[in-house]
């Protein structure tokens, strides 16, 4: 028997202060007040007879023993979540999921994921951030996000990743443009017009730039955009030929606003990954990944 006055709330306060960087942010995450968080950590230190962290102006620094106990505290919290999951009482898990997603996810199966995740974990609040993959990568690496559904490229600092979905790129044009250049045009005919596509730093954007340069096509014709969604109305208005993931154009294709071109070249498929830092991840993160894979697969099946 372990005779101790250590509580889960104390351990959660300890972990949250470390992960959020300040007592104030930890209090917000825990839904309590800053004095309460401070009192819980002070009580934990008193019970253990150690100093877990140094309180500097506006920040905290772990002591050596604090560093050693941090992973153990996370393990205890995860074990508590596993206990409730085995008991099929996910509704008792109260937490927050800071989720970062790229635009292709936001425009496809994100809503389905959020609904399914809420059914599984009704007391876990989701803080959502839709951004460029490189910015999501930075947030995840810095500990500002718990989970990311994003596309490559990303850094190697966080190595845990799970493949979620894959989307083929296609060339798209209005019926009028197709009437002028045909549905199976030479790439040179495509580059005679503006080419609407991904941001320059993305895998597809880089691949298109490299293809144009190696083939002798004018790179100046490529219009890179940080917003894939903005490329669609531009393409529908006949402002150029778009190279986008086909999944984003499903409505425009079904309405006849755009036509799929059969060109000889396209970049590698867009791959969506779930990424998280296992050192900081709550127990429900892996379940969130499984839910994402299920809803993404169901979304793809419905689109076929």
Image: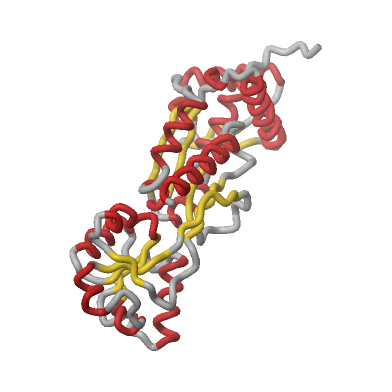
Answer with left or right where residue 68 lies relative to residue 177: right
Question: Which percent across, then down, holds residue 86?
Answer: 66, 22
Identify the residue shown where x is 36% and y is 48%: 107
Vertical relation: 146 (above or below) 259:
above
The answer to which image quadrant residue 168 occupies is bottom left
- In this figure, what is the number of numbered marks? 0
Identify the residue shown where x is 31% and y is 64%: 225
Question: Which percent across, then down, holds residue 44?
Answer: 64, 20
Question: Which percent across, then down, holds residue 208?
Answer: 41, 74
Question: Which percent across, then down, holds residue 178?
Answer: 25, 73
Answer with left or right where residue 70 lies relative to residue 202: right
Q: Relative to the observer, which residue lies in front, 12 or 106? A: 106
Q: Residue 211: in sight, yes or no? A: yes
Looking at the image, the residue that sits furthest to the right is 1
Identify the residue shown where x is 59% and y is 49%: 162
- Identify the colour scheme used: secondary structure
Q: Quadrant of the N terminus?
A: top right
Q: Residue 45: in sight, yes or no? A: no
Vertical relation: 271 (above or below) 126:
below
Q: Relative to the observer, which residue lies in front, 28 or 65? A: 28
Identify the residue shown where x is 63% and y is 42%: 278
Q: Relative to the observer, which residue lies in front, 274 or 77? A: 274
The answer to which image quadrant residue 125 occupies is top left
């Amino acid at each position: 028997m372990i005779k101790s006055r250590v509580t889960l709330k104390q351990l959660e306060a300890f972990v949250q202060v470390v992960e959020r960087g300040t007592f104030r942010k930890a209090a917000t995450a825990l839904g309590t007040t800053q004095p309460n968080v401070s009192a819980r950590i002070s009580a934990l230190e008193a019970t253990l007879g150690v100093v877990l962290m140094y309180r500097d102006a506006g920040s905290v620094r772990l002591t050596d023993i604090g560093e050693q106990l941090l992973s153990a505290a996370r393990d205890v919290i995860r074990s508590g979540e596993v206990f409730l999951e085995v008991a099929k009482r996910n509704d008792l898990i109260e937490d927050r999921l800071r989720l970062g997603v790229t635009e292709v996810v936001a425009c496809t199966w994100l809503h389905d994921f959020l609904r399914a995740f809420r059914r599984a974990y009704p007391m876990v609040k989701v803080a959502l951030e839709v951004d460029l993959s490189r910015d999501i990568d930075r947030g995840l690496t810095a500990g500002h996000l718990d989970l990311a559904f994003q596309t490559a490229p990303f850094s190697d600092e966080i190595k845990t990743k799970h493949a979620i979905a894959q989307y083929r790129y296609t060339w798209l044009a209005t019926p009028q443009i197709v009437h002028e250049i045909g549905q199976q045009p030479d790439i040179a005919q495509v580059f005679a017009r503006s080419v609407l596509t991904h941001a320059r730093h993305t895998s597809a954007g880089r691949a298109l730039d490299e293809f144009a340069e190696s083939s002798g096509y004018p790179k100046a014709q490529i219009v890179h955009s940080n917003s894939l969604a903005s490329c669609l109305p531009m393409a529908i208005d006949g402002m150029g030929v778009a190279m986008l993931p086909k999944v984003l154009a499903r409505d425009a294709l079904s309405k006849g606003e755009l036509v799929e071109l059969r060109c000889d070249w396209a970049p590698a498929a867009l791959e969506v990954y779930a990424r998280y830092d296992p050192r900081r991840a709550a127990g429900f993160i892996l379940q969130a990944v499984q839910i994402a894979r299920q809803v993404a697969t169901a979304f793809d099946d419905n689109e076929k």
